[in-house]
Image: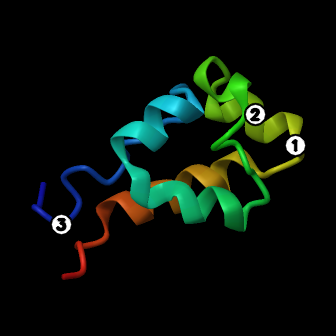
Amino acid sequence: MTENNKNANIITGDETFGEVIQKYPQVIPVFFQFGLHCIGCHISAYESIKDGAAAHGVEVEKLIEALNKAINEPKKD
């Protein structure tokens, strides 16, 4: 496995919004792009990304793919 794709699928969708946002704040714009404004919602601490996305009519696999892409992109200085 190469260094570039070592962590390619960090997010599975089973994590809560809160867990992911706290650990990977760079994903916040991705949630906004998908119409998920979960940052301030009290349910974000308990609801999985899969469940929340499905409840809002978001294509879960596309969201997870975009989240992992944001996490794996090299950090800009």
Q: In this view, does 75 lie above or below 77?
A: above
Secondary structure category for the residue under label 2: helix
The CA distance from mark 1 to mark 2 is 6 Å
Q: Earlier in the sequence, mark 3 or mark 2?
A: 3
Q: Do the residues labelled 1 and 2 touch (CB within 8 Å)?
A: yes
**What is the quadrant of the C terminus in the image?**
bottom left
> x and y percent of residue 54 in the render?
82, 37
Reading the image, the residue beneath label 2 is 52
User: Tag on residue 4?
Assistant: 3
Crowding at label 3, few (<14), some or many (≥20) Cα neighbours within 10 Å?
few
Disc 3 secondary structure class: loop
Q: Where is mark 1, residue-wise?
A: 56
Q: Residue at x 37, y 48 (%)?
A: 24
Most distant residue in the top direction: 46
Place of residue 29 in the rendered image (x, y in percent of width and height, measured from the top left): 57, 65
| Frontmost residue, 74 versus 19 | 19
- Check disc 2: other Cα within 10 Å, few if <14, some if 14-19, many if 20+: many
Say which amino acid is labelled 1: His
Along the horizontal axis of the image, is 50 left or right of 56?
left
Lower sequence index among marks 3 and 1: 3
- Amino acid at dot 3: Asn
To which quarter of the image does residue 48 belong? top right
Q: How many residues crowd around disc 1 within 10 Å: few (fewer than 14), some, or many (20 or more)?
A: few
